[in-house]
């Protein structure tokens, strides 16, 4: 009988010590504040990652908010797409919103899509890439021959050899117009077309 009790006690002690031993040996889990946290098998990627979809309490993806009509509006520094805009235009606006608070960095957004900051052509390229309207970043001068000539229904590009910006669903997406060097931002003020070639993406 005493032998059986001893065996039970030894077994219970082993079970209690097992989680600590597994954590100390570098196993899959580590205990922190009573919760088991999985250790990543690979380091986090430094490339661009999409923002997680917003979900309702039921777990169903919630569509991005829109405003009535055909013109985007500003809510703080974020643009809200018009409900009547094509999906691609909403995707361009969503992409621009992701980098709307980044600083201006000359050459930013050209070596990689997800960057610490963006210049004028990098920010326009990033927004267009959000709807797969652009496969690789362009410099300002290259936008002078990109797409089709003239203003677009939803997206218009204004480009010259030194600067480029866009008007997307009525809002100007530009690195100029705030305090010097603030980076890509939305503006309600109208475009300034003098000295710029006017283009638009095909179909928009």
Image (tube, helix red, strand yellow):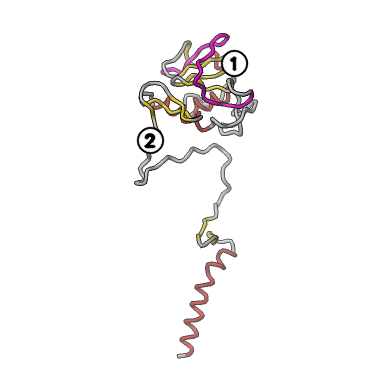
Residue that appears at 52% across and 15% down: 191
Q: Is residue 74 left or right of residue 45?
A: left
Q: Is residue 197 one of those drawn in magenta?
A: yes
Residue 69 horizontal/vertical position (percent): 36, 22
- Cα separation, mark 2 vs mark 1, equals 36 Å
Residue 97 horizontal/vertical position (percent): 50, 30
Say if 157 sits above or below 61 in the image: above
Q: Is residue 142 left or right of residue 89?
A: right
Q: Quadrant of the C terminus?
A: top left
Figure quadrant of residue 194: top right
Residue that appears at 56% across and 15% down: 159
- Which secondary structure lies at badge 2? loop
Residue that appears at 49% across and 83% down: 7
Q: Is residue 78 one of those drawn in magenta?
A: no
**Disc 2 or disc 1, which is closer to the eye?**
2
Magenta stretch mostly in which secondary structure? Answer: loop
Numbered range of the magenta stretch: 180-204
- Residue 63 is labelled as 2
Residue 156 horizontal/vertical position (percent): 48, 16
Q: Earlier in the sequence, mark 2 or mark 1?
A: 2
- How many C-alpha atoms fall within 10 Å of the one at disc 2: few (<14), some, or many (≥20)? few
- Which secondary structure lies at badge 1? helix
| Residue wearing tag 1 | 141
Q: Residue furthest top?
A: 194
Residue 162 horizontal/vertical position (percent): 62, 16
């Amino acid at each position: 009988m005493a032998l059986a009790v001893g065996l039970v006690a030894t077994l219970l002690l082993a079970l209690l010590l097992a989680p600590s031993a597994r954590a100390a040996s570098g196993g899959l889990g580590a205990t922190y504040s009573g919760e088991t946290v999985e250790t990543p098998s690979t380091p986090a990627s430094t490339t661009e990652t999409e923002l997680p979809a917003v979900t309702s309490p039921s777990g169903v993806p919630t569509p991005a908010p829109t405003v009535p009509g055909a013109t985007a509006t500003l809510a703080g520094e974020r643009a809200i797409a018009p409900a009547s805009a094509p999906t691609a235009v909403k995707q361009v606006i969503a992409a621009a919103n992701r980098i709307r608070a980044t600083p201006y960095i000359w050459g930013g957004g050209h070596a990689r899509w997800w960057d610490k900051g963006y210049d004028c052509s990098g920010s326009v390229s990033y927004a267009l890439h959000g709807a797969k309207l652009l496969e690789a970043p362009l410099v300002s001068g290259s936008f002078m021959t990109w797409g089709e000539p003239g203003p677009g229904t939803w997206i218009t590009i204004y480009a010259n050899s030194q600067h480029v910006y866009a008007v997307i669903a009525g809002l100007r997406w530009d690195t100029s117009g705030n305090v010097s060097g603030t980076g890509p931002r939305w503006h309600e003020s109208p475009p300034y077309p003098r000295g710029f070639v006017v283009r638009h993406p095909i179909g928009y």
